[in-house]
Image (cartoon, rainbow, N blue to C red):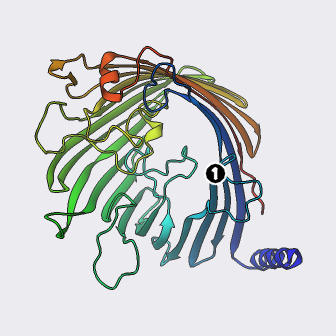
Amino acid sequence: MKKVVYSTVLLMFLVTSLSAQQLNLSAEIRPRFENRHGYKTLMDKDVDGANFISQRSRLNFNFKNDKLRFGVVLQNVRVWGDVSTLSSSDSQISFHQAWAELLLSNKVSLKLGRQEIVYDDSRIFGNVGWAQQARSHDAFLVKFTPNNKSKLDLGFAVNADGQFLTDALYSNAAGYKSFQYAWYHTKLNKSSLSLLLLNTGIEYLNGGSNQIIDYMQTIGGRYTFKSGKFNGNAAGYFQTGKSRSTNVSASYFGANLGYKASNNFSLGLGLDYLSGKDMNDSSSDVKSFAPLFGTNHKFNGWMDYFYVGNHANSVGLSDVNVTLAYKKDKFSAKLIPHFFSSAANVYNGTTKLNSNLGTEIDLVLGYKIAKDIAFNAGFSKMYATDSMQVLKGGDKDTNNSWGWIMFTFKPNLF
């Protein structure tokens, strides 16, 4: 059997080498140890944290010729020890991506299938690469590239739980029943501009057996610039429409300014604002901004207290942060303090609390061992306030921290 596999792979390689086609096979092994003692939420007193090792294993297959691009990512995500050492089967294997792209011309293409969708800084659409499983969508994209400065993507998706004979309520496993979007990006002299219009549909039961899809619109854009030693960006989005029969009115603003102090040192100042809803607001309206399909671990602190499977429809967030970065040769380091406060009012019963939620300090170190081997480690500490304790529970005065160590192996096989 092994001879057949090896012969097949060799034949494919020889055929593609002799033609105008390109075949690439790569892999990834990424084990990560974590110590969670206050990760995502505050710990209670006298409670032990969690220690575990998770691992992502991938095989990436990509093929390209004059009319076709094709990609498959086979993925296994597990925690060390969650499968018996004598197990005869493994249910953790899945297709993270499986897509094909038809090249109609050098300016127009159609991309269909399971795929990662990533735009700009991953605030609204991202692949959530930090999560071992990451994120991908079942979608159809029409991609226009009129010139080397501009591009336009149109995206469409419709989801169902199975191949039924009659209409059936969707479980919303993907987080939406359907979406349609348009994303435009253009490069200017020393800057760039992106615009996004996204229509997201959620299906639900209204009045017993009446199936309804409500649509929420996310509209906005992002601007980036670079001038000398300075670089920066600003983004703004607002959300309107309806979600599960309630009106939506929410907004987001983010801005960052960076300065390259030397070849090795750089500084950054950032602000993130996501609208929220007062805790004593009894209206049904949605006033809290939802980052939807973004890589939220990248934003608002690496301890994931906000918008990583939590903090939805809550008091929103204001995040002022500073980045101190150092990089030399194969070594890199970042220190990022975050100063959090709520965008809306926090109450403990009828008592209005201070909007200050606390301070998080993130430290990450990196070392590139070889071309395809990287080592990273990080430690984060949360200094929470009474307001955070009301929101999250737990004990603000206990040790709330998170540490991790990760190796990434990404060889290109051929």
Q: Is residue 284 left or right of residue 44?
A: left
- Asked if residue 283 is positioned above or below residue 336 in the image, the reply reads below
Direction right: furthest residue = 3
- Asked if residue 153 is positioned above or below residue 338 in the image, the reply reads below
Direction top: furthest residue = 397
User: Which residue is disc 1 drawn over?
Assistant: 78
Which of 402/25 is in front? Answer: 402
Residue 3: percent from the left, percent from the top? Answer: 89, 77
Which of 193/356 is in front? Answer: 356
**Quadrant in which the C terminus appears:** bottom right
**Given the image, on which type of amino acid does mark 1 rest?**
Arg
**Quadrant in which the N terminus appears:** bottom right
- Asked if residue 28 is positioned above or below residue 65 in the image, the reply reads above
- Asked if residue 133 is positioned above or below residue 356 in the image, the reply reads below
Camera sees residue 363: no
Which of 88/110 is in front? Answer: 88
Q: Is residue 168 left or right of residue 13?
A: left
Circle count: 1
Residue at disc 1, secondary structure: strand
Q: Is residue 391 left or right of residue 346?
A: right
Q: Residue at x 41, y 67 (%)?
A: 144
Direction left: furthest residue = 283
Q: Is residue 221 left or right of residue 281?
A: right
Residue 187: percent from the left, percent from the top? Answer: 41, 49
Camera sees residue 242: yes
Residue 316: percent from the left, percent from the top? Answer: 27, 33
Which of 319/3 is in front? Answer: 3
Q: Residue at x 38, y 63 (%)?
A: 153
Direction bottom: furthest residue = 165
